[in-house]
Each structure stands twice: as structure tokens, then as C-alpha cells.
Image (cartoon, rainbow, N blue to C red):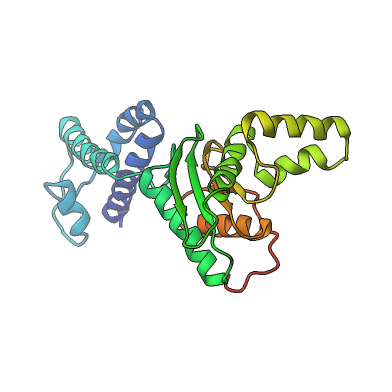
Amino acid sequence: KEQTTMKIIAATISLLLPATNAFSPQLATAGRSSFRPIFSTALSSSSYLDNLSNVSTSSSFTATDEQATEILDSTFRRTVSSTANTPSSVSVMSKLSLNEADILANGVIDNVNRNEFPPIVVTVVDRQANILVQKRMDDVCHAAFPEFSYAKAFTCVTMGVSSREFQQKYTATNDAAKIGQMNSMMAISKMAAFPGGVLLRNGDNEIVGAIGVSGAAGDEDEYVALNSAWESGLPLETMPKEHSCTTVKSP
């Protein structure tokens, strides 16, 4: 029973060491010295791995300090190396790639088709409001909607809110001065104060880009942009977080 207990302790230590190293290499190094005396008592085989796999063996030996150190250091190196080579399960998107922007644009078009909305133009921009992807569906008005869709995405990245929220910020109180300021901003910077622009943030709440859609009703433009981001599988947070569309046919 005593030998079995020691083996369980040894196995537990081998599992704890890599986790300790992940949090603090200094703590793990100290841990090796703290655990070394355990390995110098009642090990039942000539190797650490044999000891773990052969609980019923009748032979036993008492390891010297040097043997215990060698066994523990060898196990420590194996487990830490294994941990170091394991990729992190947490992924934070630092920017939108061309491929990711294309996924989002295609998702918008798919949502338009599924819901039988009017044809649209979709623009996906990066965090500096540079166009990554712009797609125009067949039969859409090509003269205005591409500019509208870009203006919506540009507004999101520039102001740090959705284009709907940009509108609400300056019109909610019906303050003439705020409305005048909004109009000036739209005239100077070609912003858009109507729904259809969705801001994209990563898991650290950093802006990585935006989607602008124009061609359908404002709520429909916004919905297809939101749903594309939600269905993409990309680690993105959207603003707004909920849609306001009442004409959805195929969620």
C-alpha cells in the first residue's frame, strides 16, 4: 500500500509540473527541489515509467539523491516539452485577413439570398478602414450603393460604434446642434448615419474591422451583416449585438 501510494504521488507530480511551469517557470523550478525527497523513497522499479505501470512488483529499492534528481529532471523535461508544444486553445484575432473578409462578404450574400432581400453591395474593411473586399450582387444599383456600403463600414471603424448607434448618438435628443454636427461629419468624411454598418471587435475588445451593407432596407442591411459575422465561426464580437429586422425569413 505504501509503494502504491508513492506511485500515485509521483504520477500526480508529473501531471502538476507542466501546469506549474505554464504559470511560472520559477515556481516550477522550485517545485522540482521540493518534490525531490518523494522520489528518494520506496520506488519499485529501475525506471520511473516502469514504476507507474507495474504496481504489483515485489522488488523495491531506495533511490539515492542523485537517482531521484535524474528521474525527476527527466520527467520534468518531458512534461514541460509536451506542454510547450501544445498550441493555446485561446485565439485572439489581431486583424482581418483577406480570406476572413471574403468569408464575411460571402456570408452576407448568402443571407440576402436565403431571406430573398433585394440585391446589395457589401464592403468589408480593416481596422484602418481600408477596403479588403467589396462585392456587388447582380442587378444592384452600382452608382450609389457601393459608396453607401463603404460609408457605413467607414463610420463604424472611425467612430467605434455601429452606423445605427452613430445615428442615435446625434439624433436621440433632437438637438439641433448635434444634428448639425452629424451632418457636417457626413459631408466632410462621407460617414453614414443609417443602419447597415456593423463594427467588428476581437476578444480583447479591439477593433479589427467592419462590414457595411447597402441595397435593402436599413434593418435588413444590418441583419445580413450581423448574421454573417455570427455564422462565420470567426472569434468576433459585433456592434450592435442584436438585430432589429422584422422581415427575416430564414434565420
Q: Is residue 183 left or right of residue 152?
A: right
Using the rendered image of the protein, determine whether residue 233 is visible from the camera's viewpoint: no
Q: Is residue 190 left or right of residue 235?
A: right
Write the residue at 62% across / 35% down. 190
Q: Place residue 132 in its image quadrant.
A: top left
Write the residue at 43% across / 48% down. 101
**Name of the residue lying farthest toward the front:** 143
Write the residue at 41% across / 54% down. 103
**Residue nearest the viewer, comparing 87 with 22:** 87
Measured from the top left, where is residue 118 in percent x and y?
A: 58, 65
Q: Place residue 36 in its image quadrant.
A: top left
Looking at the rendered structure, the number of numbered marks drawn on it comes to 0
Measured from the top left, where is residue 76 in percent x and y?
A: 25, 38
Using the rendered image of the protein, determine whether residue 219 is visible from the camera's viewpoint: yes
* Quadrant (top left/top right/bottom left/bottom right) for the C terminus: bottom right
* Quadrant (top left/top right/bottom left/bottom right) for the N terminus: bottom left
61 is higher (above) or lower (below) than 116: above
**Name of the residue lying farthest toward the left:** 46
242 is higher (above) or lower (below) than 36: below
**Residue nearest the viewer, comparing 236 with 85:** 236
Measured from the top left, where is residue 113 in percent x and y?
A: 51, 69
Write the residue at 11% across / 47% down. 46
